[in-house]
Image (cartoon, rainbow, N blue to C red):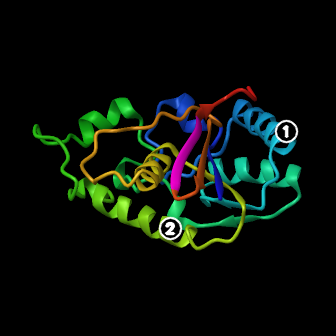
Amino acid sequence: MELLIVRHGQSVADIENRHEGRADFPLTDLGKEQAEKLATWMSSHYEIDHIISSPLKRALLTAESIAERVGISVEQDRALMEWNNGELAGELKSEAKEKYPLPKEGRKRHDEFYNCESMINFRARVEIFWSKLMEAEAERIAIVAHGGTINMLFQSFLNLPMDTNVTLHTGDTGVHLWQFKDGKNIIKFSNSQVHL
């Protein structure tokens, strides 16, 4: 099985410097252009059997651009939604620092400050998705999600512990290709934006 893991295009929150998370901002005009370029590139390089997307607008619109080019429908899965950042959702980052300060010792993995999802629950949500995904019979699946979710998927893919300090950067419409072959988990490439 091969997985094409994709981050959505630029969203309105990106350019307004807002906390996004569960805030459902659409793509900007540039984000739509990025999604179209991604779709063109993916359709000319890969035969995709299945597309699964977060239902949040920025991811779903990106996934629908790909689906239109490859001629298949998008399955929406709430497990792929970004970290539930509670009261931070939609807030300007500059203002959120004042309104929602963290304690000096920082956020613990079990903390749910300001109605946020704990990191433990976020990881568990993605692990359940991952476990179900491993039962899929498709040869190549495209997954369209968010930076935080992609990091959790990456940790699941590599069987990393909960307290890992490993992160995976993903730019707008960045693509990662992961493969399962002969009992090995293989990273073919990471954060490709060659289509842009």
Q: Is residue 166 toward the left or the right of residue 34 in the image?
A: left
> Which sits in the foreground, 127 or 18?
127
Q: Which residues are magenta?
A: 184-189
Q: Is residue 15 above or below residue 136?
A: above
Please give left or right for residue 114 compared with residue 141 in the image: left
- For the residues labelled 2 and 1, the Cα–Cα distance comes to 28 Å
Q: Quadrant of the C terminus?
A: top right
Amino acid type, residue under disc 1 in the picture: Thr
At x 30%, y 55%, the residue is 119
Query: In this figure, which residue is indicated by the disc labeled 2?
Result: 129
Q: Secondary structure at mark 1?
A: helix
Instruction: Please tell me how crowded label 1 is: few (under 14), some (14-19), or many (20+) other residues with Cα within 10 Å.
Output: some
Q: Which residue is mark 1?
A: 40
Give the image quarter of residue 77.
bottom right
| Residue 33 coordinates in the image, percent (x, y) | 78, 33
Lower position in the chain sequence, tag 2 or tag 1: 1
Q: Residue at x 42, y 53 (%)?
A: 83
Residue positioned most to the front? 182
Crowd tier of the residue under label 2, counting other residues whose Cα lies within 10 Å: few below 14, some 14–19, many 20 or above: some
Quadrant, the N terminus: bottom right
Look at the magenta stretch and give its main secondary structure. Answer: strand
Marks counted in the figure total 2
Quick one: 144 or 91, which is closer to the camera?
144
Residue 92 falls inside the magenta stretch: no
Q: Residue 68, how many percent across, how many down? A: 86, 53
Q: Residue at the spot x=21%, y=59% of the render?
A: 110
Amino acid at circle 2:
Phe
Q: Which mark is residue 31?
A: none
